[in-house]
Image (cartoon, rainbow, N blue to C red):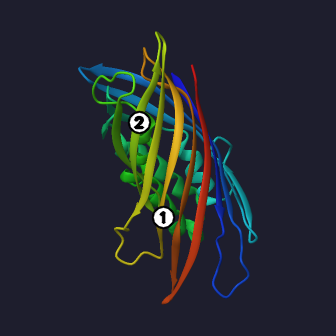
Amino acid sequence: MKTLISTVFLALLGVSLSAQTPVTLKLNLETTVISYKVLRQENEVMDIEFKFDTIASKISSVMFNKETNSAKPAGNDPLEKIMNKMSTYKLIAKISTAGKFIDFVNYKNFKDNVMIVLDSIPATKRDQAKTQAEGLLKESAVKSMVEPLFAYLPETAVKLGDTWETTYFRIASSVSLLAQNSFTLKGIDAKTATVSGKTEIESMPSNEPTPQMSQELKGSMTFDGTLDVSTGLMLKNNSKGHLEGITTMKNNGTEMKMPVAVDSLTETFMLK
């Protein structure tokens, strides 16, 4: 079993509401811990079992402060219950030896097992909780939690100085981001290889006919990492990124636009 730990710090800067006092919101996604192991391999395709052991977040604003940690017993908050339930079940996906996502093996069972938690939520909060759960657990959103994990791998053999490209989507309830990645092999020895990269990120239009919230974001991220040559696994990497754009909120026919800037620092490392 391999364990990947990612520590992410995100700051939403300069979010202001028209004709109101400017407010600053900060979202700190502190730690994500994902465990995975190979169940079987046939030719160039592996069945890999993933477990989202910990997804911790901290939200600070002038209106409220909230901390959530999926590894801790859930309280009365519906979102906490959903996240806690997600951390108790294992998801199996088919991944190529080039790191490309192919398909899920047990997505329906994974989602059904997590959705059972709705039965423990009071009826007055169940509809809202169901909406949150559907957003977190839709197949494209779950895929976007897995697909980027091995996106740094090239499809063919590379030599020192070679560059290759990959793409993937990051899906959330209010925004879909297209990530276009360019990687370069900077160094190699008998055991490790060093890779640097740059990612161009741009939000995609929502598929919902009348979304209550939408975001138009654009930016980039750079990173440097070290991977194990024998396994192809990333041992550690550090990245820095910046996104900015507009968030549009709609409520009862009223539309409000808010400028958003997001700066991020990420450190990821492997525990063997």
Cα gap from disc 1 to disc 2, whole angstroms: 22 Å
Q: Which mark is residue 183?
A: 2
Q: Which mark is residue 165?
A: none
Front position in the image: 130 or 38: 38
- The spot of residue 72 in percent (x, y) is 68, 43
Residue 98 falls left or right of residue 270: left
Furthest-top residue in this view: 190
Q: Which mark is residue 217?
A: 1
x, y (%) of residue 8?
62, 45
Residue kind at label 2, given as amino acid type? Phe
The answer to whether any part of residue 250 appears in the image is: yes
Vertical side of 147 occupied by 12: above or below = below
Q: Residue at x 47, y 76 (%)?
A: 212
Q: Earlier in the sequence, mark 1 or mark 2?
A: 2
For the residue pair 57 and 228, the one nearer the viewer reads as 228
Relative side of 184 to 69, left or right:
left
Q: Amino acid at mark 1?
A: Leu
Which label lies toward us, 1 or 2?
A: 2
The number of discs equals: 2
- Which residue occupies the foreground of this view, 81 or 237? 237
In the image, residue 258 lies at what x, y percent? 58, 76
Mark 1 near mark 2, Cβ–Cβ under 8 Å?
no
Q: Residue at x 66, y 64 (%)?
A: 13
In the image: residue 74, left or right of residue 246: right
